[in-house]
Amino acid sequence: MTELLTGAQMRAIEMAAIESGEVTGLDLMERAGRGVVEAVFEEWPALAATSHRAVVLCGPGNNGGDGFVVARLLREWGWEVELFLFGDVERLPPDARVNYERWLTGGGTICPLDDVCGGLGTRTVALVVDALFGTGLSRPLNWEVEQPLSDVECWKHRHEKWPATVAIDLPSGLCADSGQDLGARLPCDLTVTFHTAKPGHFLGEGPQYCGAVRIVDIGLPERPTGSRRPDDVVGRVGSPLGLFKNGAHKFAHGHALVLSGGSGTTGAARLAARGALRIGAGLVTLGVPPSAQMEVASQITAVMLKRVLDAAALADILQDARINALCLGPGMGVAWASDMLGALRGEGDVEPRPTVLDADALTALAEDEALFAALHPACVLTPHQGEFARLFPDIAKRLREESKSGPAYSKADAVRAAAARAGCVVLLKGPDTVISDPKGRCSVHSAQYDRAAPWLATAGSGDVLAGFITGLLARGFAPMQAAEAAAWLHTECARSFGAGLIAEDIPEELPRVLRALGI
Ligand SMILES: NC(=O)C1=CN([C@@H]2O[C@H](COP(=O)(O)OP(=O)(O)OC[C@H]3O[C@@H](n4cnc5c(N)ncnc54)[C@H](O)[C@@H]3O)[C@@H](O)[C@H]2O)[C@@H](O)CC1
Ligand SMILES: Nc1ncnc2c1ncn2[C@@H]1O[C@H](COP(=O)(O)OP(=O)(O)O)[C@@H](O)[C@H]1O
Ligand SMILES: [K+]
């Protein structure tokens, strides 16, 4: 798991490193600028081979300072560089000011950003560098910046040979903490960021603007682990290999019970059950209402079947302590899900156990405060955006609102708040899946960039994800670990299978994925 640092956390690390005397702000700026040039040459080797023309857009803060360094280094490489500045030179922060002076001393010239449209002309430009705003963006851009950015974007489209566009740290107008679009107008081919990626590279609109993301080491120290509270960290979900190998779970195989809907709506639960079995639950039983018994019996083999007449029958089944994970919701219908949830409220001596609540069970929870209040720390809620808005309308509203100042409220903030309220793990699905536990531990699973799998948006794939989580719970994974590992494996199955994927293919692809991981 790698950390994604917010703008404020980056500033704190930078300040601590400078105050300790290890490094100066100027050193960091020089390393950042050099890192950008090296990343550009690695991404487009043809640009390193000979000199070209570049346009550099610099802003009023240290992001602009990095831009001055890049402009100077490209000139030293023999390039022709035109630099456009937004903001007042007298108010540049000290390190940016030094690099502004160095640029001028080296013979560089500066034009105001307003002139960018006329200044670009028709001559070929190989590279556009966006150094207007980075982590210091504190409010939406206004037309003074949006307009020139839009002009550059339009000019690029008219340009015969498309110039490569690189953003320093973040595409300008993108909020570092949330990925909210606060006026971004210039989508980039490459974003070069420093030390770690930021949540905004993966959340919200971030991936639409960043192109590819490269992280450059500028020699800042790691954050000391002791200083971090769980709610101070947003992690990025990586391969779960370590989880399988380090014995963090009991290596039990367990027995998962997946509850099905009635006749004609059993497919979703069957998909979840297949997912739970493939991911390693020792036994999987489908709990089926009488109307669907024949339908389900004719379509399963390794998965077992148990008739569930009503809530009392479920409570009875759950007297068997070997059933150690449950999945409720897929295809159940809200009324039946509500009845079955009633059986889990601890009445009739039903021991609470690890439980995944998805689809119709989430709607049932949204409609019944008592059911919601009965959630416990071993539950995992897996809403998509619509279900999330039904369960947590106020949080979803806040997430939709455009921020007027400061870092915008992020999907990570929203899922943390939801998990704290529910008292259990919440996994909010999407290409940028966010997972949080009630203590505020939070992680982002990104199915974007080199892990893009847009074909996962296919009917029933969410049911398989619920099944994967249930299977891992049955194997003894903790709820947060189960959610993270399942999200990663789910996307990996889709990537391994490729386009044309349907939900049935996801569990069937899992053995190949596990084998490739050495699990
Ligand atoms: N934190 C670090 O460790 C490092 C940061 N560096 C660079 O420094 C950047 C952060 O620098 P700053 O904190 O100076 O922030 P920025 O350069 O991103 O922007 C801050 C400036 O923009 C103004 N501003 C903010 N929002 C605006 C808006 N909507 N319209 C008009 N003006 C607006 C602010 O008043 C301030 O003058 C990073 O993104 C990175 O590029 C690098 O030099 C290397 C090290
Ligand atoms: N563009 C996308 N890229 C990658 N994964 C996606 C994308 N859109 C949706 N997903 C994933 O696909 C699954 C869809 O689940 P869900 O919305 O519950 O659909 P369903 O109810 O049809 O199963 C989730 O795991 C979600 O994270
Ligand atoms: K930028």
Image: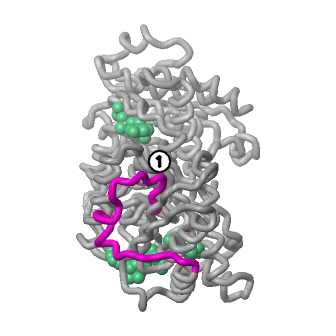
Q: Residue at the spot x=37%, y=45% of the render?
A: 383
Indicate yes or no: mark 1 CB to ligand 2 under 8 Å.
no
Residue at 49% across / 87% down in the picture?
A: 93
Q: How far from the left and from the top, in percent, is residue 39?
A: 61, 55
Tell me the residue at 69%/36% (across/down): 252
Q: Secondary structure at mark 1?
A: strand
Q: Quadrant of residue 118?
A: bottom left
Residue occupying the point 57% across, 27% down: 496
The magenta stretch spans residue 121: yes
- Horizontal and vertical percent for residue 267? 37, 21
Give coordinates of residue 454: x percent, y percent: 42, 34
Q: Work out whether 33 lies above or below 285.
A: below
Q: Looking at the picture, which amino acid does disc 1 mark?
A: Val
| Quarter of image, res 125 | bottom left
Camera-nearest residue between 169 and 16: 169
Residue occupied by mark 1 = 380
